[in-house]
């Protein structure tokens, strides 16, 4: 195993003490005097994972290793909206969650450097950066990062009893920008390789992206106790189920704040594939951070259930997927679907922000299949221009989107009953 540095051990011990940025009144500082456009070069700096007690832990990448894992990213200025303070964000969210009342929230408009999502090369590099969180060195699908990675032992975050939330932290050479990648679902037919985190990943998938606790039909064991019979689902029960400490969204907010503690003056981007992409989008909505999510299940409904205050614009969140992938398309559901057979209930359809949609069904004659969901498929698509005069499809918002229309959501349970997860 990679031995943690003294610094990493200190972070593990202190993770509960800095669950928020060093200044609780500001999300994090924004670099001043942004250039109009600046290419950035990133190196892999840390690997992040979660302890059994749901604490964020980091391992530093071995000295010299980062030289062989360099990613050049094109950037462009973008506008993001961030709450003026974390306290006001939490207060507005809790007021909505517990009292059903909206509270006016002041949003700060900032101009930051974000990834150039019109650049195929930029999207390709980000896709590669998301890929290696899935696989151990030497396995099929590993994009070679150099011999210094190979030390003959179990990589950090891959221990048999590890939690499912892990990924990588890439940092630009000038420390101005951090790219935080988050691993997606660890299941053979969803992510291109099985692993020890399938159970926890599946719990989060079914809580976040099913209409009601993964109640597909009467034969299913639900992941929360919110089903109320005859197509009814208790809304408050669902919302309580999503905020348990051990679930991935609150772990993700803790991770983000730990990273802002390490790099208080850096601009932070988020990326991920599948479940990791959806979590990246939810964190991007929370903190106003630029996001590129690959083949992510739709996260608009989970954002509403988490009572995330809605910023004036979500254009800083970009989704990329193709029409033959049933997971982000929201069609991998039903009793006989391949997802249901594997124990997953992907039922949400509506994404936030903008979507880069590759119409592989029409143009390439692909059939819809869960086998097209692995990140390697996207990496292959990004290997060449989509059209002669259009390297990638245009990013556009998803309009006229509906989901879970056959369910009735309301207050059907005794409020003294706690939602079980």
Image (cartoon, rainbow, N blue to C red):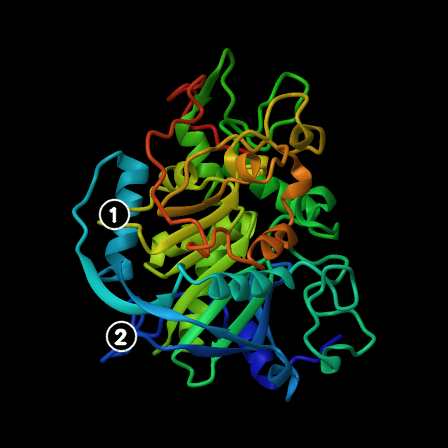
Q: Residue furthest front?
A: 388
- Residue 143 is situated, as x and y percent measured from the top left of the image, at 68, 67
Q: Residues within 10 Å of mark 2 (few under 14, many from 20)?
A: few
**SS of the residue at dot 2?**
loop
**SS of the residue at dot 1?**
helix
- The answer to whether 255 is drawn above or below residue 221 in the figure is below
Q: Which residue has dot 2 on it?
A: 36
The earlier-in-sequence mark between 1 and 2 is 2
Q: Residue furthest right?
A: 152
Q: Which residue has dot 1 on it?
A: 92
Q: Is residue 279 left or right of residue 204?
A: left
Q: Is residue 119 visible?
A: yes
Which quarter of the figure is the C terminus placed in?
top right
| Residue at (43, 27) in percent of width and height | 403
Q: Which residue is at the front of the view, 325 or 389?
A: 389
- Residue 386 is situated, as x and y percent measured from the top left of the image, at 50, 51
């Amino acid at each position: 195993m990679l031995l943690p540095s003294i610094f990493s051990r200190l972070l593990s011990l202190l993770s509960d003490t800095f669950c928020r940025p060093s200044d609780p009144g500001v999300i994090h500082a924004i670099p001043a005097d942004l250039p109009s456009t600046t290419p950035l070069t990133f190196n892999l700096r840390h690997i992040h994972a979660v302890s059994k007690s749901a604490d964020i832990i980091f391992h530093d990448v071995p000295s010299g290793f980062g030289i062989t894992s360099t990613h050049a990213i094109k950037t462009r200025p973008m506008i993001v909206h961030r709450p003026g303070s974390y306290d006001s964000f939490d207060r507005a969210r809790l007021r909505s969650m517990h009292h059903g009342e909206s509270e006016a929230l002041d949003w700060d408009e900032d101009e930051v450097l974000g990834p150039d999502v019109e650049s195929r090369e930029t999207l390709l590099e980000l896709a590669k950066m998301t890929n290696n969180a899935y696989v151990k060195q030497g396995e099929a699908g590993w994009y070679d990062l150099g011999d210094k990675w190979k030390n003959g032992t179990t990589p950090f975050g891959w221990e048999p009893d590890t939690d499912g939330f892990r990924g990588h932290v890439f940092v630009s050479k000038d420390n101005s920008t951090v790219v935080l990648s988050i691993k997606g679902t660890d299941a053979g037919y969803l992510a291109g390789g099985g692993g020890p985190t399938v159970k926890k990943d599946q719990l989060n998938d079914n809580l976040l992206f099913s209409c009601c606790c993964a109640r597909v039909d009467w034969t299913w064991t639900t992941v929360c106790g919110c089903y109320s019979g005859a197509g009814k689902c208790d809304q408050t029960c669902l919302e309580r189920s999503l905020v348990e400490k051990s679930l991935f969204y609150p772990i993700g907010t803790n991770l983000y704040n730990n990273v802002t503690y390490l790099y208080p003056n850096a601009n932070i981007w988020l990326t991920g594939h599948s479940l990791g992409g959806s979590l990246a989008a939810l964190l991007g909505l929370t903190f106003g951070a630029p996001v590129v999510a690959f083949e992510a299940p739709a996260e608009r409904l989970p954002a509403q259930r988490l009572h995330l205050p809605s910023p004036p614009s979500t254009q800083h969140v970009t989704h990329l997927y193709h029409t033959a992938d049933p997971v982000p398309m929201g069609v991998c559901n039903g009793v006989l679907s391949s997802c249901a057979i594997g124990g997953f209930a992907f039922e949400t359809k509506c994404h936030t922000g903008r979507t880069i949609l590759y119409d592989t069904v029409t143009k390439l004659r692909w059939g819809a299949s869960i086998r097209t969901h692995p990140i390697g498929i996207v990496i292959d698509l990004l290997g060449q221009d989509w059209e002669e005069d259009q390297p990638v499809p245009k990013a556009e918002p998803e309009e006229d989107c509906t989901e879970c229309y056959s369910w009735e959501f309301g207050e059907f349970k005794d409020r003294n009953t706690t939602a079980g997860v």
